[in-house]
Amino acid sequence: MKITDLLTKSTIKLDLQSTQKRDTIEEMVSVLDRAGKLSDREGYKKAILAREDQTTTGIGEGIAIPHAKTEAVKEPAIAFGRSAQGLDYESLDGQPAHLVFMIAATAGANDTHLKALSRLSMLLLKEEVKQGLLDAKTPDEVLALISHFEDEKEKEEAAENEAENVASGGDQETDVNAAIAPTGKVLAVTGCPTGIAHTYMAADALKNKAKEMNIDIKVETNGSDGAKNVLTAADIEQAVAIIVAADTKVEMDRFKGKHVIEVPVTDGIRKTEQLINRAIEQDAPIYKGSGSSKSDDGEESSGGKGRSGIYKHLMNGVSNMLPFIVGGGILIAASFAFEDQLTGERSPLGDILSMIGGEAFFLIVPVLAAFIAMSIADRPGFMPGMVGGLMAANGEAGFLGGIIAGFLAGYIVVGLKALFKNLPAILNGLKPVLIYPLLGVLATGLIMYLAIQPLSALNQGVINWLGGLGTGNLALLGLLLGGMMAIDMGGPINKAAYAFALAVAADGQFGPQAAVMAGGMVPPLGLALATTFFKRKFNDQERKTGFSAYFLGAFFITEGAIPFAAADPLRVIPSAVVGSAIAGGMTLWFDLALRAPHGGIFVFATLEDGLISVLLYTLAIAVGAVVTAIMVGLLKKPVEQR
């Protein structure tokens, strides 16, 4: 089956009107539906969006390939849409997409259909194909162009297969490249969740680049029709390194003892030369089996450098901590809707919501620390990290204390592994159940115990200092309190500002309370705005977190900004502090007073002087959030440059 059997005049639209990703998907789904290719329009759209939620199919270079394999498809088809002005498809390179191919595969798509779909993905890597599609005036020209290059591709594949058979006597496992570099053979595995686009694009990109570099390579594809060109034991034995460019499960234990580079499938499309060079130089840890790798110095990891180092460990903690922030934070905020704002008494339902949310919130720092440590040292690091994080939480060291505890526990356990690596084999069973947990938690706990005491003293000192300032200069005090709320976002400095506001509120001074809440609402709101208006500076997961931050900020849950601060503290924290300080300063400049200590928008009604105060308070928070968003947008690097 040829591509032009799946792509027809009725599924080509050369003048896409949409400018945003979701609207484009809607428009392309409509093209397929009108052509009679779908049995369930909404079901297919849902499958497409689910694939986009895993990672964007805007692969860069002006191309997007949304795709889904689902029972909602009546017959396999391809839709092509072109946007002359370009559209925001949240592409990996941050650039507008001009060419959109939407692939619809039936749940039971046969091998012939899948080969045609994968062949399209490979053709799009050719610059002359892309340019021809941009220049085509009619659907007939599009079909003729694709048919021409598909015929050429088939001839190339036939010639390569013939060369393989001549060179190997018919052995189908021989690589497509005849030229063998003296540095050795490189292997690769590609795979994406759907297995009908990125899988084959990455494979073709790696093979083409290897051919240019005169490197012998063999690529296994883990597509929707199963694994093809499977790597044999002999291949693996001869390999200098293996590149695993996949966003889906790959059988890894067969690579034990080899240098393995693990990256997303999109890197196999966009960073081919870099990956091949790393493989040739063996710039990767040695895989030890059971999901972990081990570098030559004995430290375990999941592969490679860059994001597989400190950033990877930090993100492992943040991603596992995030559900506790979102779920717990929203429940706590919701509980204030069932509270008498003047007396502070909650209804039974409010108490239940507050209790559940509070328990979830209490686990934020321990979970952060535990999963950072686990990322560094695998499962033996989890328990010491959890205990260190619990100590940080009880000692009011905040999320910064959790980060310190996580890295401390992780590397202590890594050190223990190195220390006991020559233990007699008969005692190896004691390592994970006795030696690592006992010595790991002891060392982590002792160091955290010593570190928490200075933090507590610092916290008390800040509270005393704030008390000495009084309220003589309201605007300056507001700037100070607002900024402090954003410095550590729930840590000791944040708590010090909040405690000061509560203390003066007991004496009937409610202005600082308003400044503190404004300063605490700005960081998540500012980061939410930044993810909306500076999309290129954030990855898919961060943009999704940004949507939740709108709600967390509105509910005065400052911790909603922690995932961003933890990932990029040098840019995010100063931006948040400036915005929060402005909001706090404006609040006291307007002489606003808030009687409720918590609850965000739920308690705006407790502002003194009625509606005008609500409007001014909203203005102060909005200005602070906009300032934070603009600073983050200007300071952060685009995702592709990180």
Image (cartoon, rainbow, N blue to C red):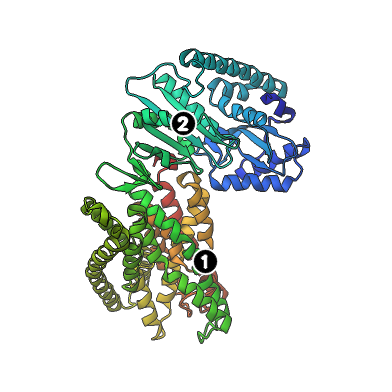
Residue 157 in the figure: left or right of residue 491? right
Residue 165 in the figure: left or right of residue 66? left
Looking at the rendered structure, which numbered label has been put on residue 327?
1
Residue at the image position 66 percent from the left and 48 percent from the top:
46
Q: Nearer the viewer, residue 321 or 286?
A: 286
Res 572 seen here: no
- Quarter of the image with the N terminus is top right
| x, y percent for residue 361 | 45, 70
Q: Amino acid at mark 1?
A: Gly
For mark 2, give the secondary structure.
loop
> Mark 1 touching mark 2, by CB under 8 A?
no
Q: Quadrant of residue 56?
A: top right
Q: CA distance from mark 1 to mark 2?
A: 44 Å
| x, y percent for residue 436 | 28, 60
Res 87 seen here: yes
- Outermost residue toward the front in this view: 426
| x, y percent for residue 15 | 68, 32
Q: Nearer the viewer, residue 503 or 46?
A: 46
- Quarter of the image with the C terminus is top left
Q: Amino acid at mark 2?
A: Leu
Q: Nearer the viewer, residue 166 or 592?
A: 166
Residue at the image position 51 percent from the left and 87 percent from the top:
343
Residue at the image position 39 percent from the left and 61 percent from the top:
368
Which residue is tagged 2?
A: 231
Relative height, residue 547 to residue 220 (above, below): below
From the image, state whether disc 1 or disc 2 is nearer to you: 2
Q: Nearer the viewer, residue 342 or 621?
A: 342
